[in-house]
Amino acid sequence: MPLSGTNGHPEGRSRITLEIETVSAKLAAATARLHDIQLTERPLRITKKMVNDTIAQFEGILERAPLDTRVATVRDLFERVDVDSRELKAVAV
């Protein structure tokens, strides 16, 4: 049975086969990239040590900063944190 639109011509069939192979190769490459991303891009687990390290890094920066910069930095940090009323925990927005 001839393929629709090709009238049974070998050139048409080979072109369709080539297009299918090209799409298949692109799909395989995209699937491999997605798999790599899922392995390397994991959500960051917030631990007490990480919070303490971040605070320690900011302490040195903020101690030398002008007052308006300190206020803006703290305001920005508070805007990025919300409180989960059920568990009474701070969560990133």
Image (cartoon, helix red, strand yellow):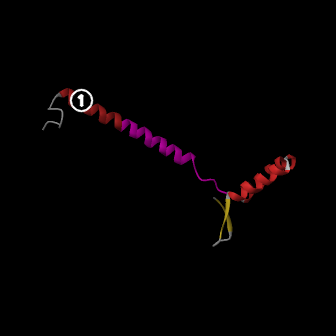
* Residue farthest left in this picture: 1
Region in magenta? 24-46
Q: State whether residue 35 is above or below residue 80.
A: above
Identify which amino acid the numbered label 1 is placed on.
Ser
Q: Could you say where residue 88 lies in the image, as x and y percent from the top left?
A: 68, 71
- Residue 84 is drawn in which quadrant? bottom right
Decide: few, some or many residues near mark 1? Use Cα within 10 Å; few <14, some 14-19, many ≥20: few
Residue 30, quarter of the rendered image: top left
Q: How many marks?
A: 1
Position of 42 with respect to 15 (left or right) is right
What residue appears at the point 48 percent right and 41 percent down from the top-left corner?
33
Rendered location of residue 91, percent (x, y)? 66, 62
**Horizontal and vertical percent for residue 6?**
18, 32
Q: Nearer the viewer, residue 88 or 82?
A: 82
Residue with the mark numbered 1: 14
Whole-percent x, y for residue 19 in the image: 30, 33
For the C terminus, give its image quadrant. Answer: bottom right
* Residue 38 in magenta stretch: yes
